[in-house]
Structure formats: C-alpha cells, structure tokens
C-alpha cells in the first residue's frame, strides 16, 4: 500500500485491507515496512522520532483486536521507541487469537542516499527470530536484511516454515530505466535464492508510490516464491494490491529431499564466515 503523513489514517487503511485479505481466506497477513507512516528515513529530521511508539503499544493493541476477530496472524512493521533516545526498526507478530507473540528488531541497518536509517535505528539485539503461530512457524526479517544469506539461513535453521520480509525500497527518480530494472531484478533474485537455498517459501511485501518530495519511487513488485524459487505471485510496480497466495507447508520436505542442501552443509568448515574479511597473513 501507499502511505500518507497521518499515522492513524495509515493504520485504519491497513486494517481495512487486513479485513479484505481475511475475506479472501488469508490466514497470515504481512504488512509492509513501517506501514503507519511515510518512509521518513529519506531525511535526517529529529521531528520524525515523534512517530515512534512502544511495542507492544497502541498499534499492536488495535491490530490484536482485529487478529482475534478475524482469526488471522498479523505481521506488523513499526517504529519502536524502546527507551528515551533508543529506537529500533521492529516487526511485531500477533497470533490469530490476538496474542502478541513478540518482536524482531531489524539487524542490518542501511545508510544510503534517501535511506538514512542509521540516523534513526539502533541495530537489533534480539538475534534472529521465529514465531510459532496458529498456522505456521514463521521467520521475519526486514528489508535490508533481505540481502544477507546468513540471516535467511539462520532463520531457516531455527525451523521457519515461511520467511517474511516487510520492505520499503524504491528507485531514485533521476535513474535511467535500465538501472531501475537491474536493481529490482537483483532484489528479487537474492530473495528467491534464499528460498532455493533453504527450501522454504519467501514472502516479500513492499510499499508503492511517491512520497515526500518525490525523490524516491517505491517499486512495489511484492512477490511470493516457493521453496524452489518459483514465483507464485508477482505484484505490479505502481498499484496497491491485497492478495492471498496459497502456500503448502508440506512442499518443504519434497524440495529438501530432492535438493538436499541442508544435508550436505559442511558446518565444520564455516568458521571463517564470522570474520569481517579474510585477509592474507
């Protein structure tokens, strides 16, 4: 969905769309990154810290009522105020009975033109997380996390049935079309590769539209890929969409038997991955 400056209006809009998804048969509903506001990280502005809230808090309370009413799991990405002067980019997970299951704090924090997230967010300190919901054991990572195979691997090894990536990513408006195409395809490709490497579905939910001064066009393109990397759904680049995609959790065993990457992992050889860079002596 696209967003506006009014937090309550965005929350109300998201709840309307959750209801639509539930009417279509959805069991797990994933909202985009920081869905209650404009993507404020395109500027460094201290006033934007006023958008933050405790988790659990007002937004999770409203979503918990909806989750319980509709019998749906809700994945809700929010700007968390943890303490005075301490903020995180955080996703809350609410079970289908309305129970708040916990939170995941974004681990990888970018700092690029129009994505000044290091100004706002402290890196996550909860580690990688999975959540036992009514319908599946889900892993949640957030946007910039999606480029890191280590994050998806650890989440999969923790037993996730599905990986969800709430996202806010787009094109600079001064870029040429070829660069735009290359960037989007790289973004989709890296996440589909996580699905293949781990044998489980990946769900990536991005926002759409121009925001603020129009310096960034969010590229939409939300998608679902199965455990073989096959696209099961692909959204447009410029339209708001609420879609339900069927996922068979039993497929993971089939994919992992026929492509036994987990079986053949050489865990005894992976210690160097914990180094920043492997320099020569």
Image (tube, rainbow, N blue to C red):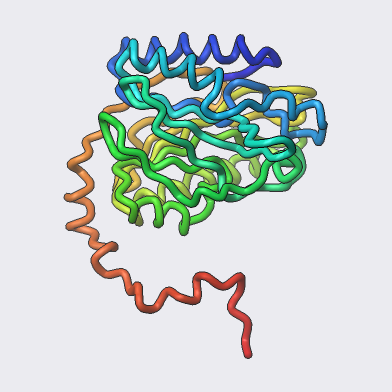
Residue 248 sits in quarter: top left
- Nearest the eye: 270 or 67: 67
User: Can residue 81 be seen in the rendering of this structure?
Assistant: yes
Percent from the top left, x then y, of residue 105? 54, 42
Q: Is residue 228 left or right of residue 143?
A: left
- Nearest the eye: 64 or 6: 64
x 76%, y 25%: residue: 214
Residue 237 sits in quarter: top right
Q: Is residue 146 left or right of residue 6?
A: left
- Dividing the image into 4 quarters, which one contains the N terminus? top right
Q: Which residue ends up furthest to the front in the rendered image?
A: 83
- Nearest the eye: 163 or 138: 138
Percent from the top left, x then y, of residue 20? 39, 10
- Dividing the image into 4 quarters, which one contains the C terminus? bottom right
Where is 179 relative to 215, above or below? below
Q: Is residue 148 left or right of residue 195?
A: right
Residue 17 sits in quarter: top left
């Amino acid at each position: 969905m696209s967003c506006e400056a009014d937090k309550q209006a965005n929350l109300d809009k998201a709840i309307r769309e959750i209801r639509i998804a539930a009417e279509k048969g959805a069991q797990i509903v994933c909202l985009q990154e920081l869905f209650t506001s404009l993507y404020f990280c395109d500027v460094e502005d201290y006033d934007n810290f006023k958008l933050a809230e405790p988790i659990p808090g007002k937004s999770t309370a409203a979503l918990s009522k909806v989750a319980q009413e509709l019998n749906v799991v809700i994945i809700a990405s929010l700007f968390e105020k943890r303490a005075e002067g301490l903020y995180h980019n955080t996703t809350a997970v609410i079970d289908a009975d309305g129970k708040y299951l916990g939170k995941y704090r974004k681990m990888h924090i970018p700092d690029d033109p129009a994505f000044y997230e290091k100004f706002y967010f402290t890196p996550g300190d909860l580690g990688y997380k999975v959540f036992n919901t009514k319908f599946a054991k889900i892993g949640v990572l957030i946007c910039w996390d999606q480029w890191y195979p280590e994050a998806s691997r650890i989440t999969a090894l923790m037993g996730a049935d599905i990986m969800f990536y709430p996202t806010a990513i787009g094109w600079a408006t001064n870029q040429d079309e070829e660069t735009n195409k290359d960037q989007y395809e790289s973004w989709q490709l890296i996440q589909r590769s996580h699905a293949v490497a781990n044998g489980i579905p990946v769900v990536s939910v991005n926002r759409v539209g121009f925001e603020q001064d129009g310096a960034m066009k969010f590229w939409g393109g939300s998608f679902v890929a199965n455990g073989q990397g096959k696209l099961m759904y692909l959204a447009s680049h410029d339209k708001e969409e609420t879609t339900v995609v069927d996922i068979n959790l039993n497929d993971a065993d089939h994919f992992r038997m026929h492509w036994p990457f987990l079986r053949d992992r050489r865990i005894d050889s992976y210690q160097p991955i914990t180094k920043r860079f492997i320099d020569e002596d």
